[in-house]
Image: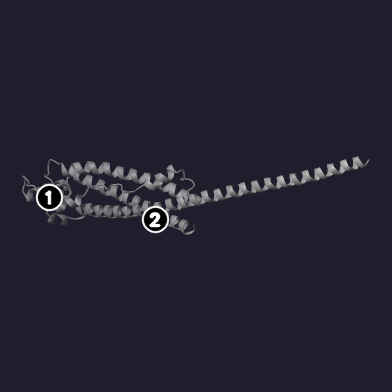
Amino acid sequence: MIKFFRHIRKTLLEQNKMGKYFKYAIGEIILVVIGILIALQINTWNEQRISNKQSIGYMKSLLGDIKSDVIQYNANIESYTTDITNNKRLFINNDYKILDADSILKLVNIFYQPNKTTKQTYEKIKNAGLAESLATDIVNKAVNDYYNLEIKYYETLLQWDKEYSNEYFKFWFYNNNYESSSIRGYSSNKLPFLASEEKRKNDLINLIESTQGRNHLRGAIERHEHTLKRVEEIKEVAENLVEIINNELNNQ
């Protein structure tokens, strides 16, 4: 009987000891899991911090690009406004006839504006897979709309203007009825003309007053008035985008 009770006591002690080991093991497992979760959280936080830093860098770079675009839009607006004014002067009155031939030709001014907008930063953003997750939904939509809608339309607009300007250029500078001066004064030495200054001037005036010449001028005015209006609208979109990005950066 004594041996029996001793056996029970020994068994209970062993079970109690096993229970302590089990509790200890459970505790160790819990600590390991907590440690892993903390490490994952720290890693996630660190990745998020790096991602936020990258996004901020991209937005600052975008801001610089779009501000440069606005400068280009302003230059185009000024150029189109001047071209329209000069072309209309050839329609409104005859005061241009007191000028010399080369000065009159400058009033025709049928050169197109080059595309100097930049999409380098936006392309980097797309390649990094951040086009839809750069910042808030408002910023993402505004940025994507600007580059995928406004800039593409602007490029199409300039290409349209370029194609027509090239046609007008051939008419004004390679016309058999008029011996034109050097293109935009690129020639350092003024080359001699077969015709006298007076004849060149009269030939140019006749060209301007011809049906084809007036049609070309009228087409240039209408095209540049349309282009001017659209560039002013795109500029406004760009300026609004600058404000949106600035607000986002200030809230970081």
Describe the element under mark 1 as helix, strand or loop: loop
- The percent position of residue 5, horizontal first and vertical second, equals 90, 42
Q: Which quadrant would residue 149 be assigned to in this image? A: top left
Mark 2 and mark 1 lie on one chain; the one further toward the N terminus is 1
Residue drawn at x 70%, y 48% is: 27
Q: Please, what is the three-letter code of the amino acid marked with disc 2?
A: Glu
Say whether residue 211 is visible: no
- The percent position of residue 243, horizontal first and vertical second, equals 43, 57
Q: Which residue is mark 2?
A: 239
Task: Count neighbours of disc 1 (C-alpha within 10 A) and say few if under 14, some if 14 to 19, many if 20 or more.
Answer: few
Most foreground residue, 30 or 51 = 30
Describe the element under mark 2 as helix, strand or loop: helix
Quarter of the rendering occupied by the N terminus: top right
Closest to the camera, between mark 2 and mark 1, is 1
Residue drawn at x 23%, y 41% is: 167
Residue drawn at x 15%, y 50% is: 185
Q: Which residue is mark 1?
A: 188
Most foreground residue, 48 or 152 = 48
Colour style of the rendered protein structure: one colour
- The percent position of residue 145, horizontal first and vertical second, equals 43, 47
Q: Is residue 243 left or right of residue 112?
A: right
Task: Count neighbours of disc 2 (C-alpha within 10 A) and say few if under 14, some if 14 to 19, many if 20 or more.
Answer: some
Marks 2 and 1, how far apart at CA: 40 Å
Say whether residue 109 is visible: yes
Q: Which mark is residue 43?
A: none
Total numbered badges shown on the rendered structure: 2
